[in-house]
Amino acid sequence: MLKIKKELIDQIKKQAEEGYPYEICGFLIGKIDYNTDTTEAVEIYQVENQNKERANDRFQIAPKDYIKVENYADKKGLSIVGIYHTHPDHPDEPSATDLMFAQPDMSYIIMSVKNKKASNWRSWKLDKDRFIEEKVEIL
Ligand SMILES: [Zn+2]
């Protein structure tokens, strides 16, 4: 389960609409409790989408941004617990490319943006070789 504050979702919505028609992306920062399989996201950190050729339907995060955000989280005693990105004019379901780059234990929030308006979103988690929808609790 993913627990996330409403204000963080609102921030993602705002970034999603500002970035339209391109995909925006960023990290979820927080803590994972492996005993209860609960992830709590307490902050988000937007990074640049490095994919310029197909920014409308692809996103890519630079290794230096991973390191930067990891260090940032580490200083606060937190970790990277997930990644969020948008699907401009596409549903909030993971693509084949999303699956290819997915890592275990991470929460993947995908937000659909339709005609510049943030729409449905869901969180996904890797289960062996496929994505399953993750339960979300808004705090
Ligand atoms: Zn995607």
Image (tube, helix red, strand yellow):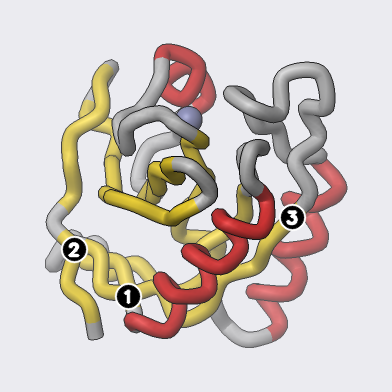
Question: Which of the marked residues, 3 or 2, is nearer the chain's N terminus?
Answer: 3
The quarter holding residue 60 reads top right
Q: Which residue is mark 3?
A: 47
For this rendering, which residue is in front, 131 or 119? 119
Q: Earlier in the sequence, mark 1 or mark 2?
A: 1
- Quarter of the image where the N terminus is located: bottom left
* Alpha carbon separation for disc pair 1 and 3: 19 Å
What x and y, as percent, mark residue 63?
Answer: 80, 40
Question: Given the image, on which type of amino acid does mark 3 rest?
Answer: Val
Q: Is residue 127 above or below residue 37?
A: above
Q: Please report contact status of discs 1 and 2: CB closer than 8 Å, yes or no.
A: yes
Secondary structure of the residue carrying numbered label 3: strand
Q: Residue at x 78, y 27 (%)?
A: 51
Vertical order, 87 against 53 (above or below): below
Residue picked out by circle 1: 4
Image point (37%, 37%), residue name:
104
Residue 35 found in image quarter: bottom left
Distance (Cα) linking label 1 and label 2: 7 Å
Q: Position of residue 14 (x, y in %)?
A: 56, 68
Question: In the rendering, which numbered label is found on residue 136?
Answer: 2
Is 98 left, or right, of 35 in this rendering? right
In whole angstroms, how far apart are the C-alphas of marks 3 and 2? 23 Å
In the visual, does 124 lie left or right of 15?
left
Q: Position of residue 129 (x, y in %)?
A: 28, 17
The answer to whether 42 is drawn above or below residue 67 in the figure is: below
Image quadrant in which you'd find residue 52: top right
